[in-house]
């Protein structure tokens, strides 16, 4: 079935990375009123090797997990998102927490009481395992390895029908990483294949998409049945469908949100809002619910599970 960048080394506040004022305003004005997938666009909401501790859910059952990115700032927004994640887990237990990177800011890559222990207390109390992606801010310290348990910059794990491949978008042209990606996808037996990488291959957000990933990784995603690619880096919620694959940016975990400034092919939704994801994967489909910090639904979608070419 067919389903429904160059990286930057810093991720500063929007003013330092944005298109110069006149041009950026023109881009946002141009977006307003344009329809994507039957929905009007607006400047504030564009619609349209194995990890330790992998789960043992039998194949054929669903796997539920939570996702957030660009979060470890110590902000009130981080605390609000975490509170909602804890409530979600209490209502319907998740198996793990997947991050899309930029886990710790100020200082980069280092967890502190203000950015981790206090705001994440309720999640830490659940005992849920973390499955963390390395963002550009995370390489400045070691806490993604020591506190979140992800010592490798790229790795994969399986749970029930799900295979998750976590990649390092800071090194998109690494021959070792590309060999790992190809080998892992070729050997994967799980029908549901999800990739997490901090810098997005496709995006409507402030930071440009990774053309290196488009050239070197995306063909492997398409060939080997990847259904969903999760990213952060742009502090927003986005959904793009390109080449049969769904690309979702969930970078609204606590850091200042970024605007939507471009119109990539396949754009279905982009909105600069704080958010996290609830993901339920079965062999037939992946249900994704994006949740705002007030607990309301930002978007709910069903992502069909793709099959590898020739199977």
Image (cartoon, rainbow, N blue to C red):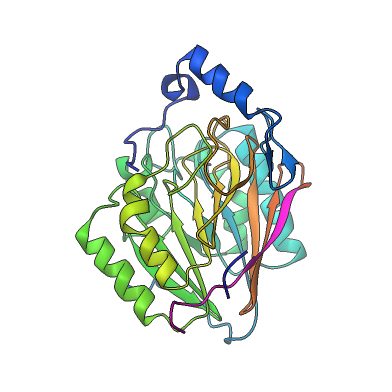
Q: Position of residue 278 (x, y in %)?
A: 66, 59
Residue appearing at x 33%, y 61% in the figure: 154
Residue 53 seen in the figure? no
Q: Position of residue 132 (x, y in %)?
A: 45, 56
Outermost residue toward the left in this view: 175
- Residue 2: image quadrant is bottom right
Compared with residue 33, is residue 237 higher up or lower down, i.e. above or below? Answer: below
Q: Position of residue 222 (x, y in %)?
A: 43, 66
Q: Position of residue 76 (x, y in %)?
A: 64, 33
Q: How many marks?
A: 0
- Residue 281: image quadrant is bottom right
Compared with residue 129, is residue 170 higher up or lower down, i.e. above or below? Answer: above
Residue 21 seen in the figure? yes
- Residue 218 sits inside the magenta stretch: no
Outermost residue toward the top in this view: 22
Q: Which residues are magenta?
A: 298-311
Which of these two is toward me, 127 or 226?
Answer: 226
Q: Is residue 282 left or right of residue 244?
A: right
Compared with residue 202, is residue 12 higher up or lower down, i.e. above or below? Answer: above
Which of these two is toward me, 11 or 226?
Answer: 226
Residue appearing at x 30%, y 57% in the figure: 216
Could you tell me which quadrant the N terminus lies in? bottom right
Residue appearing at x 23%, y 56% in the figure: 174
- Residue 305 sits inside the magenta stretch: yes
Compared with residue 118, is residue 247 higher up or lower down, i.e. above or below? Answer: below
């Amino acid at each position: 079935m067919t389903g429904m960048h160059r990286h930057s080394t810093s991720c500063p506040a929007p003013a330092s990375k944005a298109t110069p004022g006149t041009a950026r305003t023109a881009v946002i004005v141009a977006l307003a009123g344009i329809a994507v997938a039957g929905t009007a666009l607006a400047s504030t909401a564009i619609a349209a090797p194995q990890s330790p501790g992998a789960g043992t859910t039998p194949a054929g059952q669903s796997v539920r997990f939570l996702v957030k990115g660009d979060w470890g700032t110590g902000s009130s927004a981080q605390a609000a998102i975490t509170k909602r994640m804890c409530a979600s887990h209490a209502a319907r237990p998740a198996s793990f927490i997947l991050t899309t990177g930029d886990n710790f800011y100020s200082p980069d890559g280092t967890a502190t009481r203000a950015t981790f222990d206090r705001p994440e207390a309720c999640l830490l109390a659940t005992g849920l395992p973390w499955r963390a992606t390395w963002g550009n801010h995370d390489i400045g310290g070691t806490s993604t390895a020591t506190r979140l348990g992800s010592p490798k910059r790229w790795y994969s794990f399986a749970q029930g029908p799900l295979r998750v491949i976590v990649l390092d978008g800071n090194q998109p042209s690494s021959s070792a990483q590309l060999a790992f990606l190809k080998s892992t996808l070729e050997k994967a037996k799980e029908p549901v294949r999800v990739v997490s990488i901090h810098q997005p291959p496709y995006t409507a957000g402030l930071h440009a998409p990774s053309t290196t990933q488009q050239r070197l990784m995306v063909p492997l995603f398409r060939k080997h049945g990847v259904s969903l690619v999760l990213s952060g880096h742009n502090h927003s919620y986005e959904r793009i469908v390109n080449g049969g694959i769904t690309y979702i940016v969930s970078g609204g975990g606590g850091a200042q949100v970024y605007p939507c400034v471009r119109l990539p092919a396949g754009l279905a939704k982009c909105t600069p809002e704080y958010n996290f994801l609830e993901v339920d994967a079965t062999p037939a489909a992946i249900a994704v619910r994006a949740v705002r910090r007030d607990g309301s639904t930002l978007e709910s979608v069903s992502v069909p599970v793709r099959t590898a070419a020739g199977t």
